[in-house]
Image (cartoon, rainbow, N blue to C red):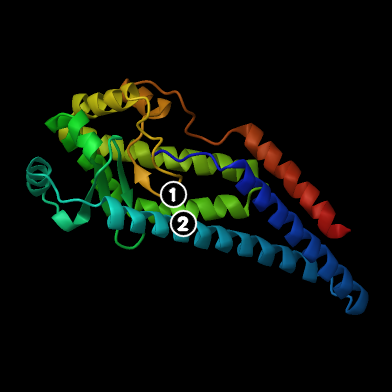
Amino acid sequence: MGMNKPKPILFAALVMVTLACLSVINWCSWISQRCLGADFVKPIALIAALLTIGLFSFIWQARRTSRYTHQLLNYAHIALPSRLESVITEFGLDTSQVIFIQSPQPTAFCFGFLRPRICLSTGLIDLLSMPQLWAVLLHEDYHRRRFDPLRILLVEAIGTALFFLPVVQEWRTLYKIKLELSADRYAVEKAGKAALAGALHRLVSYSAASRSFPSVVTAGISANSARIAALLGERSTPHQLSAKSFIGSIANLWALCLLLML
């Protein structure tokens, strides 16, 4: 799964919204304490603000993904080639669950929250052999059956709402890596390690494999060090949360508590 880093302007906007929410919280709680003597208003307002940020992130990501996939279906959707249709039929999938788009970039990902589907590009079909294409379909179908795009959407919303906790940000990254590794294990069990490793190798060799699609909430095949290391029997990415993230999160929570006491 290849998720691009957020653009600086979006990050700055998120920071501004967060600061504005905190300012409103402090202002409302100050008025409440002066007029009503209500000490509980500030923490409740803070919780409400965090929930609002998470909901805003959820809706924004969902709408952005919906607009993008709608464009794919309207402008890039083409008929399935006979070679791909035979593979899908042999795989036992309904052809309506696979979208084929005209693009020179080798791309495969699963999209859709309630009715997830698999998207493949002409560039991917031209690049991969039949066993490698089979492995990619297995990988994406694992994401589809488990509703991984919806899982990722929820994880992203939680990470945005709790942006001030390093442990949550680390958990978000590890969770997405875990989804990819689980889909890889499923593909290896069905198609063999050589087929999936070959597909990843060709994607790595193709330098622009993941640059034509914007950052949307999808679950897709992408080459990263953790997946390659897993196929090689190595372990390059920690599977547990680090002590540093816990310590940083505790420090931030203490700072937040002090802020609420003002």
Q: Write the residue at 38% across / 42% down.
A: 179
User: Which numbered marker is on residue 245?
Assistant: none
Q: Looking at the rendering, in which quadrant would you find the C terminus? A: bottom right
In this rendered view, identify the residue nearer to me: 23 or 246. Answer: 23
Disc 1 vs disc 2: Cβ atoms closer than 8 Å?
Answer: yes
Q: Amino acid at mark 2?
A: Arg
Q: Is residue 222 above or below residue 232?
A: below
Q: Position of residue 22 (x, y in %)?
A: 76, 59
In the rendered image, residue 207, in percent from the top left (x then y), is placed at 37, 25
- Mark 2 secondary-structure assignment: helix
Residue at left 79%, top 65%?
Answer: 24
Numbered tag placed on residue 64 in the rendering: 2
- Left or right: 190, with 22 as reference point: left
Between 32 and 85, the residue placed more toward the observer is: 85
Q: Tally the marks.
A: 2
Residue hosting label 1? 216
Left or right of 14, for residue 151: left
> Disc 1 versus disc 2: distance between alpha carbons?
7 Å
Check the image and name the residue furthest to the bottom: 36
The residue at the far front in this view is 75
Which residue is located at x 55 percent, y 54 percent? 158
Residue 7 placement (x, y as % from top left) = 58, 42
